[in-house]
Amino acid sequence: MNEDYGQILKALGWIDKAMDYFRQYKPETKGMTINYRNRNAEIELLLYIPDNLKRKIRKMEIPAYQNFVISDMRDESFNRIGDLWWFEDDKWKLSPSNLPPSERYLLTLKGKLSEDALTKIVFVQPSANKDRTKEVERYWLASMIRNVEILEKLWDALNVDDVTASVKIGIERSLSSTIPKDLKGRLKAAQRWIRAGRGRDREEIGRAWREMRGTTKESKISVDEIVDIIYKLTNSEVFSRFLTLDSPYTVGEVRREETFKGTFPERMYVEASTYLTLKQPAATGFLTFKKKDYTETVKKEFEELL
Amino acid sequence: MNIKSKLNEQFLTFLKNIEREIQKVWEKPKLIHYTDHGVEHSERIIKTIGDLFESSQDPDMLNPYETFILLASAYLHDVGMQSARHADLPDKPEYTLEDKEIIREKHAESSAKMILESVQPNSDFSLGLEGCEEYVPFIASVVRYHSGKRRNDLNSLKDSSLKGEYVRLKLLAALLKLADELDRDYRRINIKELKFLPLPIESKFHWWTHHYTQSVTINDGRIKLYFRFPEEYRESKIKDVFIKKTQHLIKEELEEVSDVLWDYGIRLTLDSNIGDINYVPKGVVELVPNDLSDCIEEDIFNVTSHIVPWALPKENIPINIEWSKDMVFDEIRIEIPDDFRFVEFLNVKEKEYNITGNIATISSVIECTLPDAPMYYGFIVSSTEIPDKLKVAKKILVEFLRGDKAIKSLKLYARIFRPMLEVTKIVEKIELHDDQEKLEIPINLKYIGFGDIQLKIEAGIGGRIVRESIVYELLRRLWLSDVLADESVSEGNEGKRRKIHVEPTLLQEFSEQLGKKIENGDIAGMLGMIDEGDVEDFKRWLSDVKTKDKFMEVVYSRIEDLLLDLLTDLLERHPTDSVKLANARTKVKAKIELPIENIKIRLIYTDPIENEYPPIEIPIRIEDKRVKKRKTIIDIPIIIEMAEDPLTNVAEMKMEEG
């Protein structure tokens, strides 16, 4: 059930610690973007660094918790301040006396979040099973911010980008049901060999082996040509053409999923990506795979081989 | 602050001319509206603008030109409410309510047009702008942006300059727009007229918030609201709805102009603490009409819900509910079916919900303070049982309660679909004769359920269950075709290597899996296909780097065949769109020693979330009629013929509760 505020803050790791460090400079969070897929987080803090004696004598040193980086700093006029920060002894350091005349500075920090932190921030679920029609297969997608208060307390403007729900789309039937006759002959011979292999009749195995070799010689299509086609049709760019997603979802990463690397893919791994904000805390929609079109394309490719 | 006192004599004269002409317009209006747009309204706006400046860091920030433009705009901004022609409506003796709503919608643009037109030489009307033509385009611009379709687009208004002085149009438009919105107390509307008009309910709600607003004050940048309500509402939550709605409207307005005003040091906040509520007798203040009262408790709260359109048994079902911030309720009650459970609540603090059996109550949800952010929460439920039926729809009741009364009820249906497998044909008895080395058992199955399943077939004879894996199958195939024993096959394989790209890790994985199985003594699957002695040989093969490499060399030389084989396997393992076989082949290898033996076949199927459905058990009697070969091991492959007629398009499927 719900985690309490402290636990979530703790899970946010470096952000919590950096915020804590900057507390003395009255930080105002101007924006926070979390990329769910790559777990990158970017936070913009407006710091108030008064031009007083403390500023002249005190050096700022922040331990680089979980390797976060200070990627940008700007003054009140939004001018980028050069490389005043330096990294030394696992700490980000700045001598405030070098700061140009301004009292407010916009600091951008970048770093990674743990998977645990993301899980505490966002709920994501695709349907476990597909619905289908004659034309398509579809999966529902649901995502939601788990707790707006915590996020709002930290950040007035929060974007969680690339919230991804992953779906595995089976393509084996699209491939197997369209295998051309010529290859099916080879497969039949191969099957005979396989079935012979189940027994202990070495003569039968030999006969099946020879038959299989024979069909291979006669065949116009080689296995590697079939493999090439399958690889072409499971290329992410090609496969993406057969996917549609309801707004606010878009297609993210698409790749083959293989039991053994290098063999025939049985499924395609598809990421449906969306974004969530405090004003749009939930997103629902469908991922649709145009299976009929895809199967027809596979068939056409095989026919062109003959 | 009296902003008019900032004007010099000339500007005061200009302004008096405008005031005089506009007074004429509103004294004998052509169109009667239920809202006040007359000179009194303009005077209140001017006072409010003065109050806004008092809250700023620089009360004298406007130059004289800007002050005049702003004050002239305050008098003229609603003049378009008196012109049907400028709202593109024809001249009529009477205008309908719909016409008047069109005029209202377009009035900012109409006012701007009229201001510009009024100083044209051939104009047939005057707005008192004669003599100050050079300011007219600026006045028109400020007026144009105070309402209507451009109201949210202040940033497209560009600042200008006149006689060497800035004319900060964006600032002026923001001030007029906000001051106009803040003139929102009961004086603004004619309730006697309004209450009988068949206005859209949203408009009614908007205008009734004015009726209940006693006063709006601005002090030190804090906007404070004072309300008055009929005595009857003292204990009613309906007043909270109006207070929230008013706060929401002002917050929205503030949000739209705050960036512009902030840039000029005018910092405003809405005081969340309202002043004391004044309860007055009915008659002085009207009760909300019935239709509005009903709608306040219904659709005006914009309650939306989403439940996923299908789910497997025991699958998590996410549900989310959103509504507008205006809705006031004491708690949310959720009732789920007895065979369901609550899995998780989203955007609800742990101490704010309580679960008792199949009922959960939520006392409050987490609220985002951003003005446009919706109120929402989510909850996840799942069924706890696997239903017998292929499809069931289970009701989930969500009620927003105020006191004991449900002010909003939502009936949501969790639609559960399950996979189902049927046996369509089996043989009850098989005879075994001397000339047989193999005993095929055909089983015809039909898939009629929803979604994908993985089917495991187990067969047992004398209690022994046999399963196989593809790794064993590959190994056995190579072994039995004498590949490993035949040196000549492995030599000279270089030339035969195909150009197929195979990930090197594939071979590595085969080798490792084989090695592990043999190392761990996991040889049950291999027995029957190779002798126990051979297993020892094999262990030696794989433990020696040289021979292992040689074995892998052979595997590599035969890779085309292996790939072909995997493809065949793919075909065999996916007999239909919905069914995947856990293993391509299942068979029992057994010595049948009794004259009558029973073979038991178990069909176990699981869905993608690993729900295991009640297995199908098929007993088949084997009558051994052999005389000579009674002691030989025979193969009993199970041949599955699959058909399917699955549930499709379940998202659109009509279902009855059950």
Image (cartoon, helix red, strand yellow):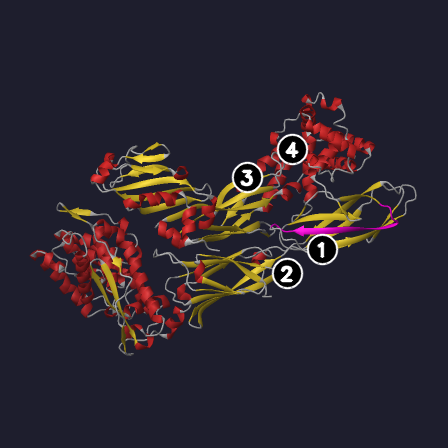
Residue A46 on image: x %, y %: 29, 44
Q: Chain of mark 2?
A: B
Marks 3 and 4 share the same chain = no
Residue highlighted by disc 3: A255
Earlier sequence position, callout 1 versus callout 2 = 2
Q: Is residue B426 visible?
A: no
Residue under the image location 24 percent in, 58 percent down? B178
At label 3, the amino acid type is Arg
Q: Label 3: few (<14), some or many (≥20) within 10 Å?
A: some
Left or right position of B540 against B65: right
Q: Is residue B543 visible?
A: yes
Magenta stretch in the rendered image: B592-608
Which residue extends farthest left?
B9
Front-most of residues B279 and A304? B279
Marks 1/3: CA–CA distance: 35 Å
At label 1, the amino acid type is Glu
Q: Chain of mark 3?
A: A
Residue highlighted by disc 1: B422
